[in-house]
Amino acid sequence: MKKPAKAAKPATARGKAAPKAARARRNDAAPALTDADRVGLFQTMIAIREFEEQVQLSYLEGLVHGTTHLCNGQEAVAAGVCKALRDDDYVTYTYRGHGHCLARGMDIEAAFAELFGRETGVCGGFGGSMHLTDMERGLIGAFGIVGAGLPVAVGAGLSAQLAAREQVSVCFFGDGATNIGAFHEAMNMAQVWKLPVVFVCENNLYGEFSHISHTTPYEDLVTRAAGYAMENVKVDGNDVEAVYEAAAVAVARARGGGGPTFIECKTYRHRGHSRTDPAKYRHPDELAAWMKRDPIPVYRARLVKRGVITDRKADAIVAKAREASKAAAARAAAAAWPATGRDMAALTFA
Amino acid sequence: MKKPAKAAKPATARGKAAPKAARARRNDAAPALTDADRVGLFQTMIAIREFEEQVQLSYLEGLVHGTTHLCNGQEAVAAGVCKALRDDDYVTYTYRGHGHCLARGMDIEAAFAELFGRETGVCGGFGGSMHLTDMERGLIGAFGIVGAGLPVAVGAGLSAQLAAREQVSVCFFGDGATNIGAFHEAMNMAQVWKLPVVFVCENNLYGEFSHISHTTPYEDLVTRAAGYAMENVKVDGNDVEAVYEAAAVAVARARGGGGPTFIECKTYRHRGHSRTDPAKYRHPDELAAWMKRDPIPVYRARLVKRGVITDRKADAIVAKAREASKAAAARAAAAAWPATGRDMAALTFA
Amino acid sequence: MAEREITYREAILTALQEEMRRDPKTLIMGEDIAESGGPFKTTLGLVDEFGPARVRDTPIAETGFVGAALGLALTGWRPIVEIMFADFLGVCFDQIVNGIAKHRLMSGGRVKVPVTIRAIGGAGLRFAAQHSQTAESWMLSVPGLKIVCPSSPAEAYSMLKGAIRDDNPVLVLEHKALLSSKGPVPVGSDDAAMPTGPRILRPGKHVTIVATLAMVGRALEAADLLAADGIEAEVMDLRVLRPFDASAVAESVRKTNRLVLVEEQVAAGGWSASVVADVVTEAFDYLDAPPIRVTLPDYPLPYSPPLEDEAIPSPTRIADAARKLMRDTGRG
Amino acid sequence: MAEREITYREAILTALQEEMRRDPKTLIMGEDIAESGGPFKTTLGLVDEFGPARVRDTPIAETGFVGAALGLALTGWRPIVEIMFADFLGVCFDQIVNGIAKHRLMSGGRVKVPVTIRAIGGAGLRFAAQHSQTAESWMLSVPGLKIVCPSSPAEAYSMLKGAIRDDNPVLVLEHKALLSSKGPVPVGSDDAAMPTGPRILRPGKHVTIVATLAMVGRALEAADLLAADGIEAEVMDLRVLRPFDASAVAESVRKTNRLVLVEEQVAAGGWSASVVADVVTEAFDYLDAPPIRVTLPDYPLPYSPPLEDEAIPSPTRIADAARKLMRDTGRG
Ligand SMILES: Cc1ncc(C[n+]2csc(CCOP(=O)(O)OP(=O)(O)O)c2C)c(N)n1
Ligand SMILES: Cc1ncc(C[n+]2csc(CCOP(=O)(O)OP(=O)(O)O)c2C)c(N)n1
Ligand SMILES: [Mg+2]
Ligand SMILES: [Mg+2]
């Protein structure tokens, strides 16, 4: 009897497309951020936060239908990862996807209009909050079924590998999603085929209402990646620059033919799972501790301290974003409903 | 940014049934085998081998319908693991399940009759080769869908944990099955709930016709287990005593409340995947090397050398098993077909 | 036993509680069902009474825990699983259709599979295409599976109790738009047989309207509209989708000679087609005109309120279908 | 283009080869399909011509590679996936019904999903309950999905070509009992439109018999039996299961006034029920008697030869149904 295994080196797979071996930029450091980049990261986080604050207000006005899943508290993940991407990269995400879409530059009026179910919505009102899609920005799909986006991201990664344009495919998903079969199949395929896929797990400690300890044998999800002998890294998901750095390394590895990476971002959602959830299952102390680590004020303080931004400038960014969200929501709310009585055949089939 | 993870200690899960902490016989050695046990292991392997040789003959006579998946070469796994079990333990297995059933004591005439589609079959002719079931022997199901038996074994393990009779649930599956989602969900649940489940992976290096290197990022599947922080062990699956020892340790751990274990048995099937497969995808040298390690002659030689058994006795065991298989097959072939024209409602619903 | 006015949600909870008290071999598994009582609060408080071993939060792993239910059932338990949205039946489909439903016959009838699968489905709440399906059409053809669908608190209560006691796999399809609806329920009842066929909710002689789940209420509303025109509709709740038996509908049609079917699924492959096919066989000479099916249109359900509303059969559309039938048969 | 007599298996292979030559954005994925050519040898040799990047062996991970097909399709590829046995559609069901089929409409019609799913199904080979399903009934109700089912080499060839070129998700259900059947195929044909409806294979005036896949051959055999009795059966191959359109069947019924349907699925929730429902709507006054459906019985398929044979519709059962219809309508 031999010793129990801890992890293993990947075996060389036969019959797969040849990796672009030339530039294996594997352990390179991330390209350094300029101060302008830093302000950009701050702006992105603010844009997401203000968008969702407005969603919440619009919700109370009855403009948002069904349910919504806000990402307050997790903005640093979307902002940091998307900063490391090119325009022609592909992204999949979930019902909790507003942040990812905005970080990729989705037009906020079209986003609001979609949440409001209007004709001018980014999906013409057909998708709603859980299904924002925007192909022009590589936003290839929001998946309402937990885990379902991961195999799709693997397909986009395979597409990128075959096209040899050094694109990268990123998928965002939660801690809970690492328990479902689709996660496993996707991780395995990406690793066997050495695909340029970056798996970004936003570990916010909860599924809907259940703590990770109910559903997963440990709290550090990088352990999952060890099971595929996949490169992996654990990062403070509330530190936007740390997220960016981890993502930049992973993205460079993927572009260089070095295969997939699993990034675990430790983070927390400030609100409940969805609009009807008061999140009583969380201890107030836990919430309070995480609120102190809110990625936005933390980063703002850091930028101010480092002299990258003044308080006045920061306030102006917030005010501008708030105003933009408010104005966009107002325009979206004034937009027409989608026409009824249409023949939907052309929308169903191409 | 922190270091990449290799593996992790399981976190304590909340809200699960309390493990029977009293007797954590975790790292105990396996109960030592007596010479009688050794002869028994040999007999079991022979019984399986001779059964399947007869299946092959019967096949050529047109008695076996559809397809069959033989386990020649892998007998040591079924024999070794089942030796470590109690009568009231539960077992799930696959379309390649003749060995597991026989090692648990399934009546060979009823097994033949099932393969022949006769009324006297262990499932009345309804199941066939891929679906041998025998509840009285804890043989709760053969699954034709790859991976499907694993969650079922987890359920039986949960059943055992709740019943607190210290039963154990074992599931047998192949290397290829570790790529499907059901595997992942089952492994995770068993580990979170610390269930008495033993996962026995028969790594015979191939799915149907594809080598493991096409489908899995490494060849040592114990790495999979590391991804769940699950106890695991790699063992020579062609060494029946090594398999027994590994299984006995895992079974004792499970009975004592110590949770699940993943056992990787390195083995090889002598024949093709199923009856129509000439297995041309394997290099003749590879096959030859493994044929030299055929678990049956290897063990026989060892037993003879140690004086546990004489050549004459061994020959007699083989002859007896061959005769028994032949006779059982003949009786099965003489049995009636299941009656047609019946109302099947009572067979469909209880 | 006492008749109480409770919600559909409470009816489900009460049935679970009563059956779990009655039989210590019952247990329930699902996502966020223990301390949190489930996203639709149909299991609220059960964990306090029965403990976390029998009211069990699962990982997000429907294949895993539905498959585990089969293992539990084969080894003496009577598991109940909750599928949070019926749409998610897709991720554990194999375990249901190839595993749970077939295990008994494949064993030659030698095993029992007492598994209850509760799935909460249905449209109308602006949950869009992946969270609004009742999804029964996927499984109408699955031999070995029983499917029931409660349209009222009393039905939710008795069907669930019957399903739990049944020794076979039963899918209980609940409707999320009904969860807060109220009605009289005979709580504490020990009589909990599975329904064997449709129930007539409103007798009538001119046209038979058959519906399930949330469409039952709309069919009753349509009957009110029709009554104003002097048309007496007989409204039937189909209740049982598997094993499928339309003979009670045929019987009603022998009286009314007209048939409208209201289905919250698309027309192709839905139960209404099977009802029509069977009624045509059994009551061919009694049909005065072709039955009309009022169903979802043939595209995935859109999110936007006007688009969703347009898609779901309304009382007006149902009444219009009945009126058309009256006209087509020269009674309009 | 040249008409050649080849097998259904070769027809599939030829279609794949021609379309993969034609469009470099096509690729095929599945289990053991590359060097080994697939368990049913429908991809034999493709890897030699197109290489392992475009003819790709996958892990046993149907959810994984079917989901990957969606990702490929959304980013400019035209993926084909092979599901080794149609029964395994159950393990990737979610990706098909909630993902692939809905993605376009959920995007407001802004994306295209050119995915072809080939699944090899069907009974008759003693493969028992988990390896014998054609399984189309699971998906008849799935909006956004197209389903076609070839009954001959020529159909296998042209449907598959049409499916690959189609910009939408198409499930091509092939039948394993037909793989070695031979027929003329217009190989090298550049005309590869998807079929739009049924095809009449044998004209007749007394009764319409509609079938799919392996049942088409049996329907034709039944027609021979009937001809001996002077009954002229019109045999139609339904061909397209989604989008569902029974109007061509209704047209035939307007001529024959009698309808028999032969389906290798159980009756409940199957396509034959949908055909009956639609034909009743469209041709009510032309039906002289209720249509008869000859289907699988309502239990999972048994392994034993006599039990399997008993379950599958036979030419005799089909002919008997037609004769009964003749008698019921006073022409027997
Ligand atoms: C297959 C499936 N099962 C269950 C659900 C219901 N559900 C939606 S979100 C969610 C929790 C997901 O948790 P996690 O992956 O951690 O993501 P988070 O919501 O925390 O971002 C659940 C159970 C679903 N959408 N899909
Ligand atoms: C979900 C599913 N996909 C594909 C198959 C077809 N199939 C049957 S056995 C097999 C290979 C399994 O390989 P492995 O798990 O290594 O077991 P082995 O046959 O080597 O014992 C495949 C692909 C199946 N039965 N189920
Ligand atoms: Mg989470
Ligand atoms: Mg194998």
Image (cartoon, coloured by chain):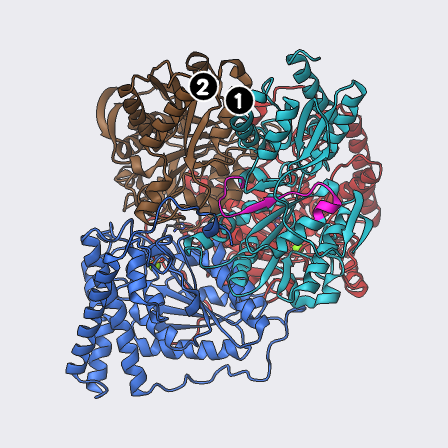
Chain colours: A blue, B red, C brown, D cyan
Displayed-image quarter of ligand 3: bottom left
Labels 2 and 1: the sequence-earlier one? 2
- At x 51%, y 15%, the residue is C283
- At x 66%, y 56%, the residue is B207
Chain letter for mark 1, please. C
Compare residues A92 and B313 and report the one nearer the observer.
Answer: A92
- Number of marks drawn: 2
Q: What stretch is highlighted in magenta?
A: D139-156
Classify mark 1: helix, strand or loop.
Answer: helix
Compare residues A43 and A299 and report the one nearer the observer.
Answer: A43
Residue C269 at x, y percent in the picture: 52, 35
Q: Residue C278 carries which label?
A: 1
Classify mark 2: helix, strand or loop.
Answer: helix
Q: Is residue B1 visible in the rendered structure shown here?
A: no
Residue C331 at x, y percent in the picture: 39, 16
Compare residues B290 and C242 and report the one nearer the observer.
Answer: C242
Crowding at dot 2, Cα within 10 Å, few <14 / some 14-19 / many 20+, comes out as many
Residue A227 at x, y percent in the picture: 51, 64
- At x 38%, y 79%, the residue is A245
Q: Which amino acid does label 2 sit on?
A: Val
Residue D17 at x, y percent in the picture: 72, 59
Q: In which quarter of the image is the N terminus of chain D?
A: bottom right
Q: Is residue B57 above or below residue D51?
A: above
The chief SS type of the magenta part is loop
Which residue has dot 2 on it? C249
- Inspect the magenta stretch and tell me whether residue D152 lies in it: yes
Whether tag 2 and tag 1 are in contact, CB under 8 A, the answer is yes
Taking B253 as reference, is B347 left or right?
Answer: right
- Inspect the magenta stretch and tell me whether residue A284 lies in it: no
Q: Which amino acid does label 1 sit on?
A: Asp
Q: Is residue C217 visible in the rendered structure shown here?
A: yes
